[in-house]
Amino acid sequence: MKVIDKQRHRTKVFKSGNSLAVRIPAGTKLAAGMEMELLVEDGQFLSYEPVEQPKRMFNIAKVAGSATSLKPIRREDRVFEERPLRSFGASEDKG
């Protein structure tokens, strides 16, 4: 059975520029800069939850050409040990 740790905090809504804001107590597991989604129904605040951030892709274009001293490995320098091919799921006799 999963135990859910619930806490209740009291806070006030205040004006911040042209928006409203709420101070989130430090005891929560939120971090500054987290993007949140608020659920408001009929003008009543119901809940908030973190917005899942999309996975970032690595941009190779930013590093391409930065390692100019690297050269491709020559064919004669590509040495691999020969080993027999095995069938998928084949068991080896280890005795």
Image (cartoon, rainbow, N blue to C red):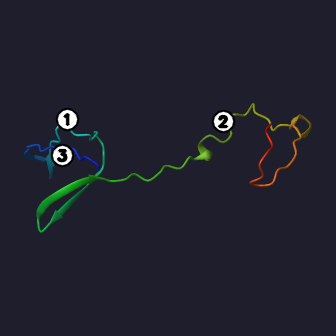
Label number found at residue 66: 2
Q: Secondary structure at mark 1?
A: loop
- Pick whichever, 4 or 44, lies toward us: 4
For the point 12% across and 45% down, which residue is it?
8
Residue at the limit of the structure toward the front, as seen here? 95
Q: CA distance from mark 2 to mark 1?
A: 43 Å
The relative height of residue 70 versus residue 84 in the rendered view (above or below) is above
Reading the image, the residue beneath label 3 is: 6
Q: Are marks 2 and 1 in contact (CB under 8 Å)?
A: no
Q: Position of residue 1 (x, y in %)?
A: 29, 50
The relative height of residue 68 versus residue 89 in the rendered view (above or below) is above
Relative placement, left or right, of 29 versus 13 is right
For the point 79% across and 35% down, which residue is it?
71
Q: Position of residue 20 (x, y in %)?
A: 13, 51
Q: Secondary structure at mark 3?
A: loop
Q: CA distance from mark 3 to mark 2?
A: 50 Å
State which quadrant residue 43 falls in: bottom left
Relative placement, left or right, of 91 versus 76 is left
